[in-house]
Image (tube, grey):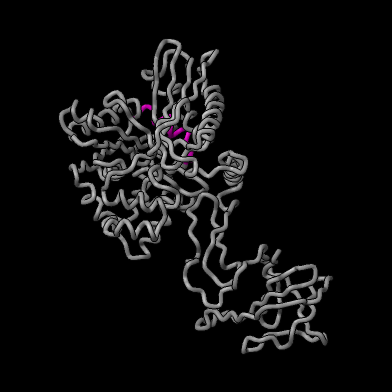
Amino acid sequence: MSARVLAVWCPDWPAVAAAAAADLLATDPVAVLHANRVIACSATARSQGVRRGLRRREAQARCPELHVAQSDPERDARLFESVVTAVDEVAPGVEILRPGLLVLAARGAIRYFGSEEAAAERLVDAVAAAGAECRIGVADELSTAVIAARHAALIPVGDGARFLAPLPIAEIAAEPSLAAPERGDLVDLLRRLGLRTVGSFAALTAVDVASRFGADAVLAHRAARGEPERPPSARVLPPDLEVEQRCDPPIERVDAAAFAGRAMAERLHAKLSGAGVACTRLQVSASTGNGEHLIRTWRCAEPLTPEGTADRVRWQLDGWLTGRSESRPTAGITVLRLEPVEVVTAGALQLGLWGGVGEEDERARRALVRVQGLLGGESVQVGVLSGGRGPMERITLVPLGDELVPGADPAAPWPGRLPEPAPSTVLPNVPAVTLRDRSGGAVDVTERGEFTAAPARLRWGSREWDVQGWAGPWPVDERWWDTSAARDAARAQVLLAESRALLLICEEGRWGVEGIYE
């Protein structure tokens, strides 16, 4: 029998967990928000028009009785532990991809229950007994099994590529735990190239994909073709990477468990950094004072950072200590152990300047998310490189946490685009300046796109400089066919004393500063 993979997917798990935490009925409409946008909603909410990506106000307008909850990964992981325990009792050896999705080797369950159909029925019943709904998928490869679970399909041996071929190309990026962050950009690019289905992408040759796209696209292409997937690591695990801590007194509270988990995560990543590797599959195990042994495995698409490791340890211990009474340990945890099961080279994880793994960036991101939670989704925005001719047009501001979608395609041809380099500082208010020639006359731009005289002096507020050099002007003639949106202007670069360079724009005979070069 081939090494088949069985996936168990609980749809809309963040919404299911939020409803359970609020003691709501399964039929109540629920939406989970992050950065003021819906990231998950229940089937009842969807039937009333709520969709992922909607802003809170619009979601509540479509469904006035909607229960709104904030995103809480700890809540999702804690409540998912009961589902994991129920599946583990039926078919041991589960791996958690994320709260709401787990996988396991199908061979043992199939042998025990006699067939894939019987094993799937038994697992659905076990998850239902834990108070949740699930879908089962079985296939030859892990990524195919996860997609099959979304369609509640049991794929015959060797039929993975045939099953995937007619599906929309977005399926290769539908599961974030198995896709790199740039997978969404790949899907957008493939759509623009006319590749609308997984089969059309799979029809490309491996050489074409490897030469045109990145490393993640090669992995997506192998998955689309139903080819055997490489394990996350082709390396032999270096010795002595595991971290163990004996707890005296025994841990019985979640806050104490979180403190211990963070310290262990730092120790583990110090060992990983010393060995030049990063972890993609982590086993968390615990022993209690009554001799109980608890083990869970977490698999991740991207190498874990210390913060990511600490989060998973905290989620897991929270699930063990506050889970269902029948599965909760009868005594405090006396031994905690973290063990990397699969590793990749450290080059797969972007290290910080001083040998860390981006701790400063992660702290900054969390602080910004906190500010966003206090002031609203639009309060924190990030810039995305966009298409356009001027510096302001090439920046699209997107709320933190939203998909980084540019306002216009930056790769499209933009005749008349400002030449490189771009200004280091962009001034959205375009302060007015005066540009004059040697005789003191005003400098303008003719209809032929030329200076009326050579620029010699520039006055900005109370200060005035000699113009030591200039480039341009470059005419800006946009949307001439639309009188309400037409723009007739010209840009120029000037070099002033003290090596100061400015980007100027002239509209209707008035000059302003669009950017500063430093």
Q: Is residue 412 visible?
A: yes
Residue 220 point in image, percent of width and height: 34, 51
**Frontmost residue, 34 versus 222:** 222
Of the pair 512 and 277, the residue shown nearer to us: 277
Residue 105 placement (x, y as % from top left): 27, 32
Report x, y in % for residue 209. 35, 58
User: Is 78 colored magenta in this rendering?
Assistant: yes
Q: Which residues are magenta?
A: 69-83
Among the 4 quarters of the image, the one containing residue 113: top left
Along the line of sight, which residue is nearer the eye, 166 or 123?
Answer: 166
Residue sitting at x 73%, y 87%? 453
Position of residue 406 relative to residue 475, above or below, is above
Horizontal side of residue 96 vs 228, given as left or right: right
Q: How many numbered marks does the figure carry?
A: 0
Q: Is residue 374 visible?
A: no
Residue 482: x %, y % from top left: 51, 81
Q: Which one is nearer the viewer's eye here, 33 or 286?
A: 286
Q: Position of 506 compared to 99: left or right?
A: right
The N terminus lies in quadrant: top left
Q: Quadrant of the C terminus?
A: bottom right
* Residue shown at the point (40%, 58%) measured from the top left: 213
| Farthest residue, direction left | 114
For image coordinates 20% across by 30% down, the residue present is 110
Q: Residue drawn at (26%, 44%), measured in percent from left and top?
A: 148
Whether residue 48 is in magenta: the answer is: no
Q: Is residue 504 left or right of residue 153?
A: right
Q: Is residue 39 above or below residue 342?
A: below
